[in-house]
Image (tube, rainbow, N blue to C red):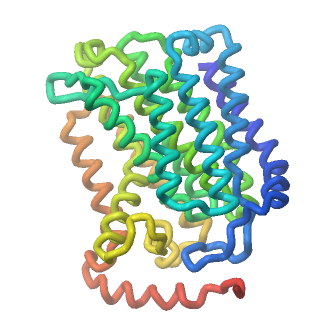
Amino acid sequence: MREYILTFLTGAIVTYLLVPLVLKVAIWFKAMTPVRDRDVHAIPTPRMGGLAMFVGMLAALLMASRLPHLHKVFTESPTWIGLLSAGGLLVVVGIADDRWEIDALTKMAGQVAAAGLLIMNGVQISWIPLPGATFVLPPSYGVPLTIIVVVATINAVNFIDGLDGLAAGIVGVSALAFFLYSFLVTVVVHLDHQSAPALIAAVLAGMCTGFLPHNFSPARIFMGDTGSMLIGLLLATSMITVSGFDPVALRGSINRFPTLLPLIPIAILVVPYADMLMAVVRRSYDGRSPFAPDKKHLHHRLLDLGHSHRGAALVMYLWTALFSFGVVALSAVKSPLIVLSVASLVAIAALVVMAFPQLRPHGRRHRGATEPQSDHRPRQPA
């Protein structure tokens, strides 16, 4: 555990110290976020902060590779080559987007290519849990499923990156919960406590923690697509590497905990996944592209309800923490699968009701009462 803590601190400190330098580079490079109708900031703000997070990731992984116990994780598979190459590719694509705003199709191609680099280096979903059994995936199923998970997670993080500190905070909380989950599974089934999923989660949590002080409202810098795609990639990779655990050992334990563990990664990310899914449904229903921006995300709804920028972000942090750590706790105390399923459905239902006010009792009246508030927000003249 001490080595994980040291790795976490390395990522956090390096990221924190590099952000001011990256801020100056972003201004010089003219990687600025203009004031747009869908945004909540009032002045142009530098982006490309993900570059500092990428260097923080490199520093944390370098530190872990030199530690007496964690260094063994790097010798077991070429996972790290895939992670570094895929991360580097997305950083390049993200920098280009932060500077010139490339189209969605080009970014999607970069995300698929990054997923391909992971697969080429052994990062692939190899099995999925079934009631009382395990379904081993052949490459013809495992490869496309891995690509879908990587691309979906990257875009889920991108979709929630619309409020100061929101993406860094939610992903940081999710990474901490996922670290706890990864560490506990090694304890329950008597595996080596040094594992790739736990290490990636610790590095990711450190990156987000170091970046958040500069990004919390009022933000001095945004992570941009450089950062949102990178942390989405790490989050997806940490989940996928769970399939490196022996499914027989997980299923064969007398404890119910291992039988629930493979479902926890999806539950931990219920907030960004649900926001992304509802955005796609909402935009498609309106006859627009799923990637067309709007101001109807969950954080926009919280602002319309009267929360400040900081208050809305803190509510989302708390929501994510309660749910993600809650599902880990439910498994740790041997709760049956039905409890975890019901908790997930209740959380998703609450998100849906927030996203679609017309579903609430007297929803039209409440919606009409809150809409004028957004019309009076001060905005920077174009």
Direction from residue 341 to residue 27 in the image, left or right: right
Q: To which quarter of the image does residue 378 belong? A: bottom right
Q: Is residue 12 visible?
A: yes
Q: Is residue 352 above or below residue 366?
A: above
Q: To which quarter of the image does residue 145 belong? A: top left
Screen quadrant of the N terminus: top right
How many marks on residues? 0
Q: Nearer the viewer, residue 228 or 177?
A: 228
Kindly identify the residue that appears in the image at 61 percent across and 77 percent down: 36
Kindly identify the residue that appears in the image at 70 percent across and 60 percent down: 99
Kindly identify the residue that appears in the image at 48 percent across and 22 percent down: 121
Q: Is residue 279 above or below residue 233?
A: below
Q: Residue 353's x, y, as percent?
A: 31, 69
Q: Residue 354's x, y, as percent?
A: 36, 69
Q: Is residue 260 visible?
A: no
Direction from residue 312 to residue 14 in the image, left or right: right
Screen quadrant of the C terminus: bottom right
Q: To which quarter of the image does residue 357 belong? A: bottom left
Direction from residue 100 to residue 249 in the image, left or right: left
Q: Is residue 180 above or below residue 244?
A: below
Q: Residue 97's x, y, as percent?
A: 63, 57
Q: Nearer the viewer, residue 291 or 219?
A: 291
Kindly identify the residue that appears in the image at 23 percent across and 44 percent down: 341
Most distant residue in the left direction: 132
Direction from residue 189 to residue 85 in the image, left or right: right
Q: Residue 132's x, y, as percent?
A: 14, 24
